[in-house]
Image (cartoon, grey):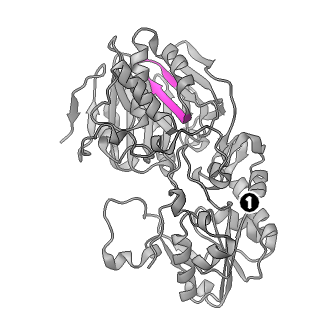
Amino acid sequence: MDQPEPEPREECGVFGVWAPGEEVAKLTYYGLYALQHRGQEAAGISVADGAQIVVFKDLGLVSQVFDEQVLSSLRGHVAVGHCRYSTTGSTTWENAQPTFRTTAIGSGLSLGHNGNLVNTAELRDRAAELGVATRNGATTDSDLLTGLLAAAAADKGIEQAAMELLPTVRGAYCLVFSDESTLYAARDPHGVRPLVLGRLERGWVVASETAALDIVGASFVREVEPGELIAIDAEGLRSSRFATPEPKGCIFEYVYLARPDTTISGRGVHATRVEIGRKLAAEFPAEADLVIPVPESGTPAAIGYAQASGIPYGSGLVKNAYVGRTFIQPSQTIRQLGIRLKLNPLRDVIRGKRLVVVDDSVVRGNTQRALVRMLREAGALEVHVRIASPPVRWPCFYGIDFASRAELVANGLDLDGIRRSIGADSLGYVSLEALVAATEQPKSRLCSACFDGKYPIPLPEDIHIGKHLLEGIEKGVAGSAAPVLTTGYGAEDALRRP
């Protein structure tokens, strides 16, 4: 049986807080909890108290890595948080974030990165010239960036070092970093990934999504602008421009990546997805009895499709809310059940019905193929598949772990070929024009490279791009099973909790 494919995964969620008098570690914990959908492989928090930085990180979900005892031990007024899904570097403890370095003058630097760089090889060569080595076997572009920043900060300070380094960094990056007393945030000149600024009664917050501001009670102030560096300390907030903004926000954030209760560029994600469904119904109508979503990501678009088509909306699939990334592989017997690990049909609802099934995207096609077969076995008369995004024909080099181009089902087949491949009675994808219209953003301000192959940030030769690029240069150390606490002004010795 076809195995359900991994869903498209975004690299990371970042969160930072500057708030004297607040329990910043707990605020960061809850902020990361709200951003857990952006990365489930590892989580970490650094806290600074004006004199030292303490970093705690490990593999696993936020709720698995941190407990009350750990959070209570992380005391200070500045925090940086990170939850990771890897797009550069393997899933090892060494590659968990925040990354940490010590500058030549003895101050610490903790950094969390969301996105993916495209000139990593060039930066690696520069680091080699400067004698900046990877730390503890890390193999990520984020660790490389931290090393370069720490090296440059030795004689000019972190803020000035960032202003000089960031214009030479190409790709997608939202950075949240700190020294012992100051919180910094920066966004690449294209603003590919979202980053927002919020206000607390006694401080400031930066986060990947507005939903993370909501959970900690921070009021939304504005987005961090593309090409902007923000610094927050006891003197207040100051903003600097290190590059001219050329906005190219990721359109796939609206399709799948962001939480539905998040707002991007003034447009609510849920409202956008409902509108995509309405436009999908206009472009690809169907004669059917029931519209059902593939939960949860297909739900808003299915609601919109039902509203526009007049076909009743219903729940035909039940999702197991507790199936996520797991380190325990299913047995062969369970593996053969495929998609049923995550979804199971409501037979009484779908038996004898002509169904419109709305999903957010198709990558390899395995999930949809298994889903169509499962619905037919449960008694559906017809299965009309509708997709709330255009065909994914190109890989993403800016922070989404799509398949390679050869694995993308839409790259090798036309619409009818894909329909036959997944076994649907009909198939329709929303057009790129309709998707852009639903976002209410100008197409010129959006990156849609995964749909049209137009990459706004120039790419180097393929040989210099890849998730394991740096591992070919320096082999990493096997991941540790124990969480690690790093303390002091960048103390190199790690204290391992039993």
Where's residue 348, x and y in %? 58, 87
Q: Quadrant of the N terminus?
A: bottom left
Where's residue 487, x and y in %? 28, 26
Where's residue 406, x and y in %? 52, 61
Check if residue 175 falls in the magenta segment: yes
Q: Quick check: 346 above or below 111?
A: below
Residue at which label 1 appears: 276
Q: Is residue 213 left or right of residue 443?
A: left
Residue 21 vs residue 170, the one in the foreground = 170
Residue 486 in sight in this render: yes
Question: How many dots with numbers?
Answer: 1
Q: Quadrant of the C terminus?
A: top left
Majority secondary structure in the magenta region: strand
Residue 48 in sight in this render: no
Looking at this view, name the residue that lies furthest to the top. Answer: 155
- Image-quadrant location for residue 50: top left
Residue 416 vs residue 340, the one in the foreground = 416
Residue interval drawn in magenta: 171-184
| Residue at image coords 62%, 73% | 418
| Residue at image coords 80%, 67% | 283
- Image-quadrant location for residue 394: bottom right
Check if residue 376 falls in the magenta segment: no
| Residue at image coords 37%, 75% | 335
Label 1 Cα crowd, 10 Å radius (few <14 / some 14-19 / many 20+): many
- Image-quadrant location for residue 248: top right
Badge 1 marks a residue whose secondary structure is helix
